[in-house]
């Protein structure tokens, strides 16, 4: 893209795209595991980093590169690294930025496996992890140890919808020599730009909003600093967490409509949240766009919109929630989120089933919590579906 000052929507469509000899309108799928060198010297120069050229798809590939450059431009970073899944992005970042005997502070309600891999796997290398309610920055300050290296936040958090102040965290990270990593999956760069707010690294499960069509799994990392970028790139390549070219093509197609999908989904979400907030069978609802959300003002400040994710509990607790999930007809009873279709799921027994009962309780993931990802169908149909399901409770 020639204009470096192009707007966000223009970048969605054009950033990272390159011209090929046929004038292809889309970035082609370079479904090749390896790339021919011009001669022996060129091969040696590519490996030595003296010559440009693709070598092997685990290390780099034109289709994947286009996606990395596209998302980097959306996040205003230095460079990006696409990965096979969101978890591959998370583990590549952990591997690159944590060392033996180091310590990480993370959001208590972080996506279950992002916690589990620290507790069950990285702990074997004496990596310590503290999970705290990062929406109160006092908890972060209290958790800092001499060996703390990384402050990792997920905001809004999955599934509690707690919001953490990115700018305040960046200030703490700077003062204490930590790297601030933000999982931006729930917002996407359309609604929130962590690097602009002072974060060092931003990552996504592109499975969700960025791809948006529930047809691939993938991840991406964008770093602000070249040295941090190099470290993470190294970990990704050496652990073999790369994305596949076809996956990258799908994401490049999906991301083009990111802003119009999110505009529509969050317009629907506001209507759904208002419906749930006034429904007599609903005990509580957490949606950043509602004034009763504890960090509504912070959400207004650091996000461009409130998104389309929400959680709620019913008066009859888990049993009532289960009946609701068993009777919806339009919403899919399925994990994942951020797609064009409306999804409903129960984190305590599904996405966060691997988190212990005490840790779930401490993180605010109660048994009655039902998570709702609002899609881009007609709002009246989504609400109508909930209304008929409520009649079974
Ligand atoms: N970060 C967040 C905030 C997530 O919600 C997920 C997946 C991941 C990272 C991991 O990404 P993946 O490897 O799945 O691409 N969250 C899921 C969820 O809430 N339901 O199913 C998956």
Image (tube, rainbow, N blue to C red):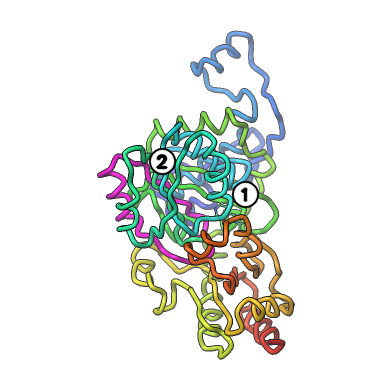
Question: How far across and down, in percent of the image, does residue 205 sit?
Answer: 57, 51
Q: Which residue is drawn at 44% across and 74% down?
A: 289
- 178 part of magenta stretch: yes
Ligand 1 rendered quadrant: bottom right
Secondary structure of the residue carrying tag 1 is: helix
Report the residue marked by disc 1: 251
Q: Give the range drawn in magenta.
A: 159-187
- Residue 160 or residue 201, whichever sits in front: 160
In this rendering, the answer to whether 102 lies above or below 297 is: above
Q: Is residue 342 left or right of residue 313?
A: right
Tell me the quarter of the picture where residue 317 sits.
bottom right
> Residue 178, image x and y in percent?
34, 41
Q: Is mark 2 on a helix, strand or loop?
A: strand
Coordinates of residue 228 in the picture (x, y in percent): 41, 34
Pointer 2 local density, CA inside 10 Å: few below 14, some 14–19, many at least 20:
many
Residue furthest front as drawn? 358
Q: Where is residue 139 in the image (x, y as percent from the top left)?
A: 34, 57
Q: How far apart are marks 1 and 2 (CA)?
A: 33 Å
Residue 123 is covered by the magenta coloring: no
Assess mark 1: CB under 8 A from ligand 1? no
Locate the C terminus by quadrant. bottom right
For residue 117, which numbered disc appears in the image?
Answer: none
Nearest the eye: 275 or 129: 129
Residue 379 lies, with reference to residue 39, above or below; the image says below
Viewer-nearest residue: 65 or 138: 138
Crowd around label 1: few <14 · some 14–19 · many ≥20 (10 Å): many
Q: Give the numbered dot on residue 103.
A: 2
264 and 179: which is toward the camera: 179
Q: Which residue is drawn at 51% across and 29% down?
A: 234
Q: Is 86 left, or right, of 306 in this rendering?
A: right
């Amino acid at each position: 893209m020639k204009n470096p000052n192009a707007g966000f929507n223009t970048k969605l469509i054009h950033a990272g795209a390159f011209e090929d000899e046929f004038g292809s309108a889309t970035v082609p799928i370079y479904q090749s595991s390896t790339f021919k060198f011009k001669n022996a010297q060129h091969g040696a120069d590519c490996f030595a980093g003296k010559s440009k050229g693709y070598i092997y798809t685990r290390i780099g590939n034109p289709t994947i590169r286009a996606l990395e450059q596209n998302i980097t431009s959306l996040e205003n970073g230095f460079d990006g690294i696409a990965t096979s899944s969101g978890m591959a992005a998370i583990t590549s970042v952990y591997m690159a930025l944590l060392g033996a005997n180091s310590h990480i502070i993370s959001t208590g309600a972080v996506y279950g496996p992002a916690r589990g891999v620290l507790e069950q796997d990285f702990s074997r290398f004496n990596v310590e992890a503290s999970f705290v309610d990062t929406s109160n920055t006092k908890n972060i300050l209290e958790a800092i140890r001499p060996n703390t290296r990384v402050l990792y936040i997920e905001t809004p958090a999955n599934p509690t919808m707690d919001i953490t102040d990115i700018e305040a965290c960046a200030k703490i990270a700077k003062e204490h020599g930590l790297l601030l990593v933000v999982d931006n999956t729930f917002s996407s760069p359309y609604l929130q730009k962590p690097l602009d707010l002072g974060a060092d690294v931003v990552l996504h499960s592109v499975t969700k909003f960025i791809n948006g069509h529930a047809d691939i799994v993938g991840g991406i990392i964008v770093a602000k600093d070249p040295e941090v970028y190099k470290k993470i790139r190294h970990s990704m390549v050496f652990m073999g967490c790369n994305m596949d070219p076809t996956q990258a093509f799908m994401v490049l197609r999906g991301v083009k409509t990111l802003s119009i999908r999110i505009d529509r989904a969050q317009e629907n979400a506001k209507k759904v949240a208002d419906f749930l907030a006034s429904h007599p069978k609903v005990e509580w609802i957490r949606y950043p766009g509602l004034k009763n959300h504890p960090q509504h003002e912070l959400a207004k400040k650091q996000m461009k919109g409130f998104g389309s994710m929400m959680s709620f509990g019913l008066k009859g607790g888990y049993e009532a929630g289960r009946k609701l999930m068993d009777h919806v007809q339009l919403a899919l009873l399925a994990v994942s989120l951020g797609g064009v279709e409306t999804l409903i799921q129960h984190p305590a027994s599904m996405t966060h089933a691997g988190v212990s009962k005490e840790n779930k309780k401490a993180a605010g993931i109660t048994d009655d919590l039902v998570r709702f990802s609002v899609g881009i169908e007609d709002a009246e149909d989504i609400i109508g579906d909930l209304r008929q399901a409520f009649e079974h409770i």
